[in-house]
Structure formats: C-alpha cells, structure tokens
Image (cartoon, rainbow, N blue to C red):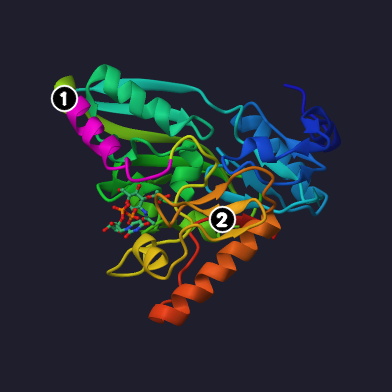
C-alpha cells in the first residue's frame, strides 16, 4: 500500500473557511480557517499525525449540541467526526453489540433500540448529538448516562496512535469522562452493549423518558442544559429562583420554560451568550452562594 505524504492528507480533506454556526444546535460560532472531515478512522489517524508533525493542535466537533464556539475566524484546525457515522450490530445470545462511528447520532441508536426491542439506551432518548460527544461529556438523563451502556471505545491519541479502552478503563463522573482532559484526542468509534427484550416494554420506557423532557424547550436553538447540577440541587431551580428566566443579552436569552436552557432567538453571538452566562452565574452566586459550573463546552473562547 502506498503511504501518503502528510501534506497530501492535509490538503485532501481541507475545507477552508467553513461556517461553524450551522453545525451547532445553538447556531452560534464563527468560521474555521482549516476544517477537516475525515471519512474513516485511518484517514483521521493520518490527519492527526500530519497536524502533529506541523506542530498544530486541533478542536474536535461532533454533533455540536453542547458547544459554544467563539465568533470570528478560528485558525486552530477543526476536525469534524460527521463523516464517521457507520452503525452495525452483532447479536451474541441475548446481548447486542452496536458498533458505531463517533459521528453517529445518539438518536439513531435509540431508534434502532426502539425498532428492535433492545434495552439499555432508554436513558439516552431525546438527547441530541453524536456518540463521540456523548462519551466525552458522559451525556445522560436522571435515568442514567452513556457510561452505563458503553462497552468499549476506540480513539486516536495525541501521538496519532489508535487506542482502544474498555468502558471500565475510562474514568467517569457526572457529565464527565477522562476524555475531557485529553488534548488532541479524537474518538473514532464505540461499541454500545444492549440486550434484547420485549419491544413493547422498551417503547414504554422510551416514551416515559421523552415525557420527562416535556418541561424543556423544543423547536428553538439551544445547547441543552448550560450548567451542571450542583450537588443536591438543580441548576434550573436555582436560576429560576434567582430571577434569571427571560434575561437577555443581544439575541441570547434564558428560556422562560426551563431556566437552564439558553436560547439563541436569532442573531445571538458567542459574546452575547458568554455575557448572559456570566450574568446568571453572578445572580445565582449572590442569591444562594453557589457557583454554577458550565456543562456547555466552550471552544476558542
Ligand atoms: N426547575 C425550576 N425551574 C426551571 C427548571 C427547573 O424550578 O426553570 C426545577 C424543576 O421543577 C425540578 C428541578 O428544577 O424540581 C429539576 O428540573 P428537571 O426535572 O427539568 O431536571 P434538571 O435537573 O434541570 C436534568 C438534566 C437534563 C435531563 C433532565 C431529565 C442536568 C444539568 N440536566 O435536568 O439534562 O434532560 O434531568 O432527565 O443534569 C443536559 O444535560 O443537557 C440535560 C438537558
């Protein structure tokens, strides 16, 4: 097999001046000067090696559902996982091993579970975003999170080497995984372990989980919950009680429906959103002495 020169791979997948806002659920973000969308694990590894060789770090963009990307031009390369979306599965006894590219949407896994009567992914229903992003941030609901159904994960480390970890080799916390602290690392795929069950029971549980989200805004541009829940309390309750609902900066506002959701009602910039976030942190801290921590990940801010 012919080995590709590093510069060739950097040219091959380069998209210049890619607008990032449409790739996020908040519809906020500037332009990536160097945007890459490798179609396979192998190409992603070659790309990361080439970036390392030229001394560049990079940002990873998954489903863009939990991200606040800065305005303006972003010169740090961005690698999108959106072309790595293959999903396949293998049945072993009453277990199902679903292998998915990191760019696969969580909702496609929930859909497959629903169609086939597989249990284990119910706690992920209604969560936007990609499998890779859900692993990094251990996405979930009050019923459980990604770490619970993950079997193993493959990723490319800072040196460009392909690695694989069993789920119990990753350290997990509430909306946290050890991947959050790893620079220049890209998750390429994962295996989710589910089990076969009566599809009616699975459907009922997914319906109940979706019902739990009826208190959240839908059909508007948000990034899910902005803040993590502090121990023993809920960020939404604290923000609401501190009078944050309806506060606005430019085009960014705090949802009237659920105070831990911030909305881009049109034309909001990252700067508007960041000012609103700071205003709300200050209000809650002044009122309750609790300093809220961001769940939303900030890129280039
Ligand atoms: N509340 C208010 N005012 C509000 C919003 C909430 O008083 O404006 C109160 C509610 O009445 C309730 C409590 O706060 O007593 C908790 O609210 P909710 O049931 O909506 O749950 P949450 O803690 O705000 C968490 C997750 C959500 C997940 C839901 C359902 C976090 C930060 N949030 O929300 O996850 O969908 O449970 O399982 O852990 C996300 O992480 O992006 C997310 C949306």
Q: Is residue 212 magenta?
A: yes
Report if residue 1 is visible in the image.
Answer: yes
Report if residue 160 is visible in the image.
Answer: no
Q: Nearer the viewer, residue 22 or 166?
A: 22
Q: Which residues are magenta?
A: 202-217
Q: Is residue 215 above or below residue 285?
A: above
Q: Mark 1 sits on what residue?
A: 197
Please tell me the numbered disc located at residue 32. Answer: none
Q: Main secondary structure of the magenta part?
A: helix
Q: Along the horizontal axis of the image, is 134 left or right of 40?
A: left
Q: Nearer the viewer, residue 30 or 77?
A: 30
Q: Is residue 5 above or below residue 215?
A: above
Q: Position of residue 136 (x, y in %)?
A: 48, 50
Mark 2: secondary structure: strand
Q: Position of residue 282 (x, y in %)?
A: 52, 75
Q: Along the horizontal axis of the image, is 14 left or right of 222?
A: right
Query: Which image quadrant is residue 114 in?
Result: top left
Q: Quadrant of ligand 1?
A: bottom left
Q: Does the CB distance between marks 1 and 2 fall below 8 Å?
A: no
Q: Which circle, 1 or 2, is nearer the viewer?
A: 2
Mark 1: secondary structure: loop
- Whether disc 1's CB lies below 8 Å from ligand 1 is answered no
Q: Mark 2 sits on what residue?
A: 297
Q: Along the horizontal axis of the image, is 273 left or right of 174?
A: right
Q: Residues within 10 Å of mark 2 (few under 14, many from 20)?
A: some
Q: Earlier in the sequence, mark 1 or mark 2?
A: 1
Q: Is residue 173 magenta?
A: no
Q: Residues within 10 Å of mark 1 (few under 14, many from 20)?
A: some
The residue at the point 49 percent across, 56 percent down is 226
Q: Nearer the viewer, residue 257 or 178?
A: 257
């Amino acid at each position: 097999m012919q080995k590709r020169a590093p510069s060739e791979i950097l040219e091959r997948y380069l998209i210049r001046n890619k607008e990032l806002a449409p790739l996020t659920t908040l519809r906020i973000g500037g332009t990536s000067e160097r945007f890459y969308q490798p179609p396979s694990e192998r190409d992603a590894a070659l790309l990361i090696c080439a970036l390392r060789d030229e001394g560049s770090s990079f940002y990873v963009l998954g489903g863009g559902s939990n991200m606040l990307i800065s305005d303006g031009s972003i010169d740090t390369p961005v690698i999108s996982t959106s072309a790595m979306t293959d999903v396949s599965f293998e049945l072993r006894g009453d277990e199902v091993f679903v292998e998915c590219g990191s760019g696969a949407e969580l909702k496609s896994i929930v859909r497959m579970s629903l169609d086939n009567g597989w249990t284990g992914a119910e706690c992920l229903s209604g969560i936007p975003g990609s499998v890779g992003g859900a692993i990094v941030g251990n996405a979930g609901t009050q019923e459980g999170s990604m770490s619970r159904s993950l079997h193993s994960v493959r990723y490319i480390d800072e040196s460009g080497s392909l690695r694989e970890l069993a789920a119990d080799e990753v350290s997990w916390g509430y909306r946290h995984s050890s991947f959050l602290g790893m620079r220049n690392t890209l998750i390429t795929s994962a295996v989710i372990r589910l089990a076969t069950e009566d599809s009616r029971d699975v459907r009922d549980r997914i319906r109940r989980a979706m019902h739990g989200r009826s208190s959240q805004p839908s059909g508007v541009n948000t990034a899910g919950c902005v803040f993590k829940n502090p121990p023993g309390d809920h960020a939404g309750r604290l923000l609401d009680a501190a009078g944050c609902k309806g506060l606005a900066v430019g085009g960014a506002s705090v949802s009237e429906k659920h105070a831990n959701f911030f909305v881009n009602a049109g034309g909001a910039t990252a700067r508007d959103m960041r000012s609103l976030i700071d205003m709300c942190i200050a209000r809650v801290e002044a009122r309750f002495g609790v300093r809220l921590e961001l769940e939303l990940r900030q890129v280039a801010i």
